[in-house]
Structures are given as C-alpha cells and as structure tokens.
Amino acid sequence: MTQSIRWGIIGTGIIARKFAADLQLLPDAQLTAVGSRSQSTAREFGRLFNIPSCYGRYEELAADSQVDVIYIAAPHVFHFENTMLCLKNGKAVLCEKPFSINAQQAEIMINCAREKNLFLMEAMWTRFLPVITRLCQLLDEKIIGDIKFVTANLGFKTDFGPEHRLMSLKLGGGALLDIGVYPISLTSMLLGVPDTLTSMVQYAATGVDEQAAILFKYANNVLAAIHTSIKVQTSNEMLVVGTKGQINLDAPLYRPGKLTLQLEGQSKQEIMAPCTGGGYQYQAAEVMLCLREGKTESRIMSLADTFSVMQIMDRIRAQWGLKYPGEADGCHSLSAARQASPRHRRGRGICAS
C-alpha cells in the first residue's frame, strides 16, 4: 500500500476549502494540519475537514514534523513570506497562483527551494485538468498544423467596494494578477515567452487595474491577444488557430471541460474531457507523484514556466507604470531566468514537442 502524503494548508478561505474538499478524492492524501491567523478559525476549518492539528500561527504549522507538504492558500500578497517560512522549515510547497507579486520575489523563492533541495510548485491548477492534457496532445500531433494565433479572455463583472482585496493596491489587487494570470499562463504554455508585447490598461478609482488588453508577438509572425477584466463579463474562452484548423477551449477558461475542434473543410467536433470534483486534486496528485519520485519540481508546471509568467506580468506592469506598495524600482530581476532552467526555448511547457 502506498504511504500517504501528509498535507498542511495555510489559509482557511474559499480556495483553501475547495482544495481541502478535493484532496479527499485522493486516497493517498492525508490532510494533517491547517494554519490560520486565529486559533478559532483554524479549529472551525479543522472540524469541517476532520483535520487533527489546527494552528493559530503559521509558524506552528511550518514546524510540524507530521507535515510533508504545505499548500499556501493565503492572498497572493502573502505568498512570498508564507512560502519562505515553509521552505526554511524544510517543507515542500504548493503555492497558489499567482506565485508571487513580482519576478524578484519569485527568484528568491526558487533559489531558496533549490538551495534546500525542496519541492516547489505554483498551483496553476488549470494546467493539470484532463481537457488541457487533451489539448496538448492534439497540438503535439499537429492536428491543426502550426499555431499562428491565440486569443484568450477571462473577465467578470464585479461590484466590489474599495475595501475588497481585489480593489486594493496594498493587497496586490486588480485583474492582472488575480485572473489575468490564467490566460497568460495558458498562452505561455503553448507559445513560450513573447519576443515583444504591448498592452493598454483601464484603472479603477482605487488605482488597481480593472481591465486590460494585451498583445504578444512571437517569431514567425505568431500573435496572441489577451483580455482580462474585473469590470465586464467576457466569454471566458480560448481560441487556438493553426494553419489547418482551430481549437476552441470552452468556458470557463480556468476550469474547462470541453474542446471544440474545427478542421478545414470538416464539421465541428466536440471533445469532452470533464474533471471530477472541483478540479484541484489533479495538481495535488502531481505534487505527490513528484515527492514520491524525489523530484523538486514538476515538468507540467516547472519553475522556469512560473518564473517566465511572472516576468511577463512584470513587463506588462512596467508599461503601465503600475507598482504595488513596497516595490522598489528595478524589481524585475532577470538573473533567475538563467538559474530556473538549463534550456530556454519557446513552448517549454507540457505542449513542448
């Protein structure tokens, strides 16, 4: 019988609850501990999911010898400090997306994990869904020929007040980091790092980006267009256009369950690939597989991929002149790109041929 991997969770919000629920779908996963900033909140979460160890301080969870890996589900402005706390205590880490606020933080996190020979991965759960696996298989088979254009959008109409975290610069709010990371990460998975990019932004009254249009250009005149918004509801789809046809990744972009394939001169073909549960268990299964195999990072969601996405979002914000409180000038370090991976080629993610 396979020995269980013992999980801890930092944070007790909506994402933490979804992850905890889906973790129960994996028979070899054991949710051992939860950490909150208050003991009562930790205990309430523990009662919901039958968790034996409930801590009112993150430091106590990080020091728990009965925990193998910690999932960080706190707001993303705290991802850096939470990840560093866990790594310094010798824990493997699955950190919720976006991985950090900027590439400089990501570089420090990656370097720390490598120095300590610990597993670290961004919880970009969409990349692990069955439909994305199927999409990459089709693209690897060149069923639509060479990719020439990608368009992706993710947007929701919200009415949050200025006190909400999405509307707060101090908490890293705005559309880009919170939901724009989905279409950017998926586009990066398919095409890699753009040679050039241009973008336009619309700000909310609080100073956060409430919607943006982003254009990537790659070699061989390949283009990608991305729209992200917390102001309007969009179709929340992705379209990949090739020289022989196109594939539409149906809504919602963050959790799709169906592809529509349209080859030239043929009828549309729907390809179903639904996920079970909420879909968070697939990334957890990858983490546990890597830990059992002694790996310190995932091939599907590599640290190089995570770092390149953070750099892309830094480049976008640099065009806007948008900085979060506490960020210094020149925070967009490039040195980790050389350390994150021995290879730097377009499409180095799961769709790499």
Image (cartoon, grey):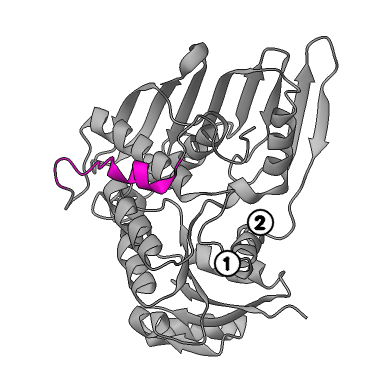
**Residue 333 rendering spot, x and y as whole percentages:** 25, 42
**Residue 23 rendering spot, x and y as whole percentages:** 64, 70
For residue 337: magenta? yes
Q: Disc number at residue 130?
A: none
**Residue 297, above or below 52:** above
Quarter where residue 190 is shown: top right
What crowding class fits label 1: few (fewer than 14 Cα within 10 Å), some (14-19), or many (20 or more)?
Answer: few
Which residue is identified by label 2? Answer: 279
Q: Residue furthest left?
A: 329
Which residue is identified by label 1? Answer: 294
Taking the spot 21% from the left edge, 42% from the top edge, the residue there is 323
**Residue 212, above or below 159:** above
SS class, disc 1: loop
Q: Nearer the viewer, mark 1 or mark 2?
A: 1
Q: Which residues are magenta?
A: 328-342
Q: From the viewer's side, name the closer residue of 163 and 113.
A: 113
**Residue 4 rendering spot, x and y as whole percentages:** 66, 79
Quick one: label 1 or label 2, which is nearer the N terminus? 2
What crowding class fits label 2: few (fewer than 14 Cα within 10 Å), some (14-19), or many (20 or more)?
Answer: many
Q: Residue furthest bottom?
A: 52
Quarter where residue 52 is shown: bottom right
Q: From the viewer's side, name the closer residue of 165 and 247.
A: 247
For residue 270: magenta? no
Q: Residue furthest top?
A: 265
Query: Left or right: where does residue 63 sit relative to residue 258?
Result: left
Indicate the amino acid at tag 2.
Gly
Indicate the amino acid at tag 1.
Gly
Asked if the residue under mark 2 is in contact with the one under mark 1, i.e. CB atoms within 8 Å, the reply is no
**Residue 187 rendering spot, x and y as whole percentages:** 53, 32
The reply to whether residue 174 is visible in this rendering is no
Taking the spot 66% from the left edge, 63% from the top edge, the residue there is 285
